[in-house]
Amino acid sequence: MTAALLTRSAAELGRLMAAGELTSEELTRACLAQIEALNPRLNVFLAVDADAALAEARAVDARRAAGEELGPLAGVPIGVKDNFCTTDFPTTCGSKMLEGWVPPYDATVVAKLRAAGLVIVGKTNMDEFAMGSSTETSYFGPTRNPWDDARIPGGSGGGSAAAVASFMVPLAVGSDTGGSIRQPGAVTGTVGVKPTYGGVSRYGLVAMASSLDQPGPCARTAEDAALLQEVIGGYDPHDSASIDRPVPDLVGASRAADLAGLRVGIVAEFQGDGYEPGVLERFREAVEALRAAGAEIVEVSCPAFAYALPAYYLIQPAELSSNLARFDGMRYGLRTGDDGARSAEEVMNLTREDGFGREAKRRIIIGTYALSAGYYDAYYGSAQRVRSLIQGDFDKAFARVDVLVSPTTPTVAFRIGERMSDPMSMYLADLCTIPSNMAGNASASFPAGLSDGLPVGFQVMAPPMDDARLYRVGGVLERALQEKWGGPQAPEGVLA
Amino acid sequence: MGLTADDVARLGALARIQLSEQECAELAPELDVILESVASVSEVAGPDVPMATHAMPMANVFRADVVTASLTQEEALSGAPAQDDGRFRVPQILSED
């Protein structure tokens, strides 16, 4: 009974509640029980407030009972990555620096979730300040992949992806700077979407690399992700990069019957050496499914994509070293070593030594180096030129095709601990996802099946503000593959 | 390139992070690997390629010059490690010498 409820999509749950066949309280209780059962094993949620969630659920039920017209996701429980400001939960960013900090305002994404009647059950684990591809750099311990406890759930938003994959909640929100929604989606067999930069407000999202950060949905189906993006998307005057245009019809796109007339470009650079055979096999099958659905398939070369990763690892540390300067122990968060005798600068140095983990320090130091006098043009400047080349490759490609596709990640989930001492091998997990952050276009990962029992992701990239194309391709692919598999694929041992 | 432990300590000072000698010694080779891996970037695009400044082209964005609600003093101070008389209390900023 509970399993039958937990495995339903958010869209179905919303319809059941609207029809009076299910209450948000019943559903929220089922999700809370699932979290209680699995969180000790998977370490997905950093904070859960069961009483507040149930009170919120009952409030939605009461509004519905009173005849109020509610949105399609009203009453659906959701998890929120711990770098979105919430006035009723601590917001730690997975860091000792912000342990226990409760923000004085809600992020726009959070405010929109509340306004749409979604029930926020808790905050999900993440790499410290979103720096990582495995959720291992969290001060609060790693999250485990529901498909295999010994493996990583991706990162930085491993918590949000694992929450959805293990049926703790049907939906979650994440943030994607270099792949932090899509790569966890790929390795947990879930849907993860990075909307067009500026499509979803960053206000109240703790900044990592401002020119790359983009919030987006995590879900188990394309339709659910579309429903969620329609809730959280749209113009926000509080975010100066927010695009002042209506959110396109994403839900309609996710229900498209076929891909007739759609031109799909395979990125030539994202195949071959370094890609696991099982990943490439699933990728080719997915491409064939698109072809069978009416898409025209061509190969497209984007030579500058080869330099996206190194350029990203200059731009992102440079921006984050500036953004993380705000954690100085003066106004909020951790303060260490304030003994009455030390100067503000000494206390700052000690606070940042104490509050940041190893990966944060690495990147802050790299960023400081890349921005320091005499190196700025060679590093940050060169990287921004490469960014122009990447944008140019996308422009040329999108003149020929409607969407680009590639594997989301070169490999399936790796083992916990395997790449922690080798930063460059960790960074390679984001090889295919980074170009879309550099160019700002929309991009998503959809489940493409399993390789040796572990999920593989299929990445779709669309031009800026054409997010609907992602959902059209994702929806058609999902139905085609599930028909073949006989239903959605789910990890074993997570449902009682 | 060859970053030394002293270089790392200097960068740590610029970034306001106290790093132990051991941390500097460990970070130096790790950072070297990263810098070597990203070095190719400087050879890809010549000066004729413009620097991208934004992911999406956008003109300056200003809001209307009108007074809007902001955090109250109490809210702004709610996360302060130390406060005094409605203000942030911070360690001494000026030294005596």
Image (spheres, coloured by chain):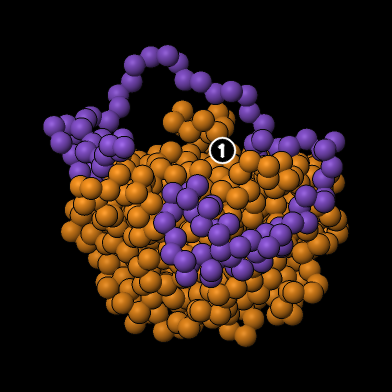
- Horizontal and vertical percent position of residue A263: 80, 52
Please give the letter of the chain rendered in orange. A
Relative to B6, A228 lies left or right: left
Q: Return the residue found at the far left.
A: B85
Q: Return the residue found at the far front.
A: B97
Q: Is residue A466 visible?
A: no
Quarter location, residue B57: top right
Q: Residue at x 50, y 79 (%)?
A: A416
Q: Is residue A51 above or below residue B53?
A: below
From the image, tell me which residue sits under label 1: A198
Q: Residue at x 46, y 28 (%)?
A: A237
Q: Residue at x 51, y 30 (%)?
A: A240
Relative to A447, A346 lies left or right: left
Q: Could you tell me which quadrant the N terminus of chain A lies in?
A: bottom left
Q: Is residue A89 above or below residue A372?
A: below
Relative to A240, A375 lies left or right: right
What's under tag 1, amino acid-wise?
Gly
Q: Is residue A16 above or below residue A283?
A: above
Nearest the eye: A25 or A39: A39
- Horizontal and vertical percent position of residue A318: 58, 47
Mark 1 nearby-residue class (10 Å; few <14, some 14–19, many ≥20): many
Quarter location, residue A105: top left
Q: Is residue A308 visible?
A: yes
- Horizontal and vertical percent position of residue A466: 66, 42
Q: Residue at x 63, y 48 (%)?
A: A370
Q: Is residue A341 above or below residue A238?
A: below
Q: Could you tell me which quadrant the C terminus of chain A lies in?
A: bottom left
Q: Chain of mark 1?
A: A
- Horizontal and vertical percent position of residue A320: 52, 48
- Chain B shade in the render: purple
Nearest the eye: B13 or A401: B13
Relative to A281, B10 lies left or right: left
